[in-house]
Structure formats: C-alpha cells, structure tokens
C-alpha cells in the first residue's frame, strides 16, 4: 500500500470520514460557487444542516452541461491566480469541459495515482512506459506523475509511433505498460510484424489500462498476448482524471478511493438513490477538491458498487466493472445494447480479430450492423467459410443478446487502427 493510513480504514471509519468531509465540502461549495449556492437555495437545502446521506440526497445533481455552461474556466471556487493547471475534455459535442487544479489538488491527484499503481502491484523501481496522450487530456500527466511519486522510472512515450514504442520497450526493459486497452491490442498485433516476440523480448509484468470501456474477453487477450496481469483503471477528467478507482492485484472489482470520492448509485431515469448492491448510474462527489468542487456529479457510467471487504484487506467500495455508459446505449429492436456487450460476444469466438465496428445508420434500429475483422491465420486456413462464419457470429449474438445482427466480414487489417482510443461505434447519423 502507498498510503496505509487511508487504505486500511475499515468501513465504519471510512464512512465516518466521508460524512465529516462531505459536510465541509457542501458548505465550501455553497460559499464559493455561485451555481451551488443558487441551486441549494432553490431546493431549500441548508448546507449547515447536512447530518447524513439522506439529507445530502436533496441536493440537485451536477451534470456535464453545467461544466460546458461555465466555459472557459469551468466551475471555480477559487480566484484564477490560485489555479495552477487547466485540463479539458474533447469538444466533440460542443465546447470542451474545462477542469482546474490548485497546487493541493494536483498533489492529491498524484498521491491517488501513486496509490492506484501500488494497489495494482506496481513497485518503486518499476519502469513505466506511459503511452497515454499528454496535453489537455488528463491521462498522460496523471499516469506520469503518479508513477514518479511512487518512485518508478517513467518513459513518457505518449501515444503513437508504434515502432519506437516497441523498440524502447525492449531496449529500456519496461516493466509496466500504461495504455488504453485498444492500444495494447494494437501493440500486440504490431510486435510480431516488427520481428518481436512479446513474451521473450519484453519484460512487461503489469498493464494499467483505462480511458475506454473494455470487456473481460479483451483483458484475457491482452494478458495472453503479453504474459502480464492487466489491471483496469477508472477515472474521468471531471474527477481529477485517472485514479478514481483501480483493480487491486486480486482483480475483483475496482476500489474507489473512498476518502476522496463519495459514490452513490441512482436510477438513471428517476434519479432515485438505490440500495447498496443495486445496478445503476454512478454519481460522484469530490470530498477535498479546492479549485472545482463537484457535488453529486452524474457520470453516466452504469455499474454496481460493493462495500464488502476485499481479499487485499481494503474496505474502499468497489465498482464491479463498468457495464457501459447510459449515453452510449443503443436500442436495437427494443433491447438495450452496449458496445462492450458486443465485444464480449465477439471476442469469445475463435477466428475474430481484436477489431470490429458497430455501424449506426438510422434513428430507429431493428438490427445490429457490425463490421468484424477476421483473424489472419483463420482467414488463410482451409476452415474459413465466410458465409458460415458470418451466420455463426450472427446466431451467437442473437442467442446471447436477443437481438438480430447483420455481420459484415472484413479482411485482416482492413478496419482502421487508432493509436489511442478505439472508435468502436460509427454513427452515420452525425455525418
């Protein structure tokens, strides 16, 4: 453990600390953020009388549009001269969401990332090859500084230039790979083409993967290809960045750092807070952030939270793998479908490569249209029968997900690769 005093708190002590910090944060946000003062007044919420989580549930939610509405400097509780850094998410659906940090915020984030690495089994002296993008995206700098705080050597290769990535990984003896899951699969595909044997030529032992949804089947492919343990890391720019939650070495759910984040699970449609163990949308409150406090921030991520003690000895609540995002959900013939579910089915099938795309071409869908790339060795084998293979994939998707699927088989290497986040859904309605 990197921070035993906090990581070893039992459930009762952790929840008492959360309530203590929550009371202070509600008052702090009320006093320093006009938006929160206005909303609490409108909801008749007295910030000095938050005695328990039931009282807290009366505070209105914060959503991503609130951040966009406060562009360019975001929701701030401190003067601009106290801001040490700004990050921003992409602005594909409008203006970017800007997040700000004081010096204390940055130090907190770096410590959380050091915890995140340590919980996954990374140690002082490990060599971390950080392939996340640097710049406005929080991933690169988050993974970078956390590793340095832990005492690791960091190679800031960033995204892209795959030939150099592989060369440096071999020559430098990198032991930890920090990457998106799709880029790890990209590297696994590229390495043999560049003459490398992934298990013999590299010293990777742990992978720190996040920034996009991925399935258990994708994890198994990565672990098998590299001979490593692949750990899931959860975060979002609005909540510092990566480092909100991580799988420990037991890989049984992602520990949310409960001393810094209070999590609720709500019904996406009604906003009702659901009982512990229910499946719903994750809602986060930051408990110590100075620059940009967030109260009841709707993540749109769907999951279950478990408060039981983990084998590692931590009581910090665990996300039992994010199923998907409510705003990524497709409705196919009246059935709710998430891209990660499609990946789960496809990657269980022999002969399917790591690359696929879901095509959305009209507002009302009655069947899935999926481009599936065929694995090269299977493509060249005498067993490959395109018609029969497409039928088998379609039938499997129908059997597992109860939706009809149109399968378009693609030759090896024909689905575009991306050195970063994979583009799994192609929405032609937006073109």
Image: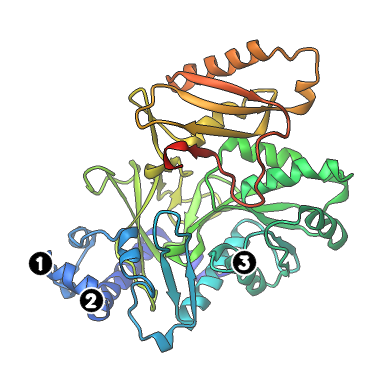
Give the spatial CA distance, label 3 vs label 1: 43 Å
Quadrant for the N terminus in the image = bottom right
Badge number at residue 44: 1
- As helix, strand or loop, the secondary structure at mark 2 comes to helix
Position of 4 compared to 273: left or right? Answer: right
- As helix, strand or loop, the secondary structure at mark 3 comes to loop
Give the spatial CA distance, label 2 vs label 3: 32 Å
How many dots with numbers?
Answer: 3
User: What residue is shown with label 3?
Assistant: 134
Numbered disc in front, either 1 or 2: 2
Image spot of residue 194 (x, y percent): 86, 46
Residue 227 visible here:
no
What's the residue at 33%, 41% (across, down)?
278
Position of 421 compared to 165: left or right? Answer: left
User: What residue is shown with label 2?
Assistant: 34
Image spot of residue 327 (x, y percent): 38, 44
Numbered disc in front, either 3 or 1: 3
Judged from this view, the residue extending furthest toward the front is 431
- The residue closer to the viewer here, 256 or 242, is 242
């Amino acid at each position: 453990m990197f921070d035993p005093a906090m990581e070893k708190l039992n459930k009762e002590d952790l929840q008492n600390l959360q309530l203590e910090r929550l009371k202070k944060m509600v008052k702090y946000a009320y006093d320093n953020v006009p938006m929160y003062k206005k909303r609490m007044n409108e909801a008749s919420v007295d910030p000095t009388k938050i005695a328990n989580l039931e009282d807290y549930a009366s505070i209105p939610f914060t959503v991503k549009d609130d951040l966009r509405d406060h562009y360019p400097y975001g929701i701030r509780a401190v003067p601009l001269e106290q801001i040490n850094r700004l990050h921003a998410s992409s602005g594909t659906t409008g203006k970017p969401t800007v997040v700000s940090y004081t010096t204390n915020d940055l130090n907190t984030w770096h410590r959380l990332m050091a915890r995140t690495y340590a919980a996954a089994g990374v140690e002082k002296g490990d060599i971390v090859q950080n392939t996340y993008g640097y710049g406005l995206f929080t991933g690169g700098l988050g993974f970078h500084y956390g590793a340095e705080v832990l005492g690791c050597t960091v190679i800031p290769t960033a995204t892209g230039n795959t030939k150099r990535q592989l060369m440096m990984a071999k020559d430098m003896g990198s032991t930890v790979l920090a990457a998106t899951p799709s880029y790890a699969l990209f590297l696994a595909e590229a390495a043999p083409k560049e003459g490398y044997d992934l298990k013999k030529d590299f010293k990777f032992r742990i992978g720190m993967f996040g920034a996009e949804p991925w399935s258990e089947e994708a994890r198994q492919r990565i672990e098998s290809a590299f001979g490593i343990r692949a750990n899931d890391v959860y975060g979002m720019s609005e909540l510092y960045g990566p480092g909100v939650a991580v799988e420990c070495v037991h890989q049984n759910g992602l520990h949310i750092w409960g001393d810094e984040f209070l999590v609720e699970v709500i019904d996406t449609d009604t906003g009702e807070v659901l009982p512990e163990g229910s499946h719903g949308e994750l809602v986060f409150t930051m408990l110590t952030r100075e620059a940009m406090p967030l109260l009841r921030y709707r993540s749109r991520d769907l999951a279950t939270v478990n408060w039981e003690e983990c084998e590692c000895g931590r009581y910090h609540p665990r996300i039992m793998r994010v199923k998907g995002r409510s705003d990524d959900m497709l409705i196919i013939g009246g059935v709710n479908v998430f891209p990660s579910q499609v990946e789960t089915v496809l990657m269980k099938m022999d002969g399917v490569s790591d690359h696929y795309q879901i095509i959305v071409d009209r507002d009302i869908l009655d069947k899935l249209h999926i481009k599936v790339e065929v694995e090269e060795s299977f493509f060249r084998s005498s067993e490959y029968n395109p018609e029969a293979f497409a039928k088998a994939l379609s039938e499997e998707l129908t059997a597992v997900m109860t939706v009809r699927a149109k399968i378009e088989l693609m030759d090896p290497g024909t689905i575009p690769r991306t050195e970063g986040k994979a583009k799994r859904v192609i929405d032609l309605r937006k073109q």
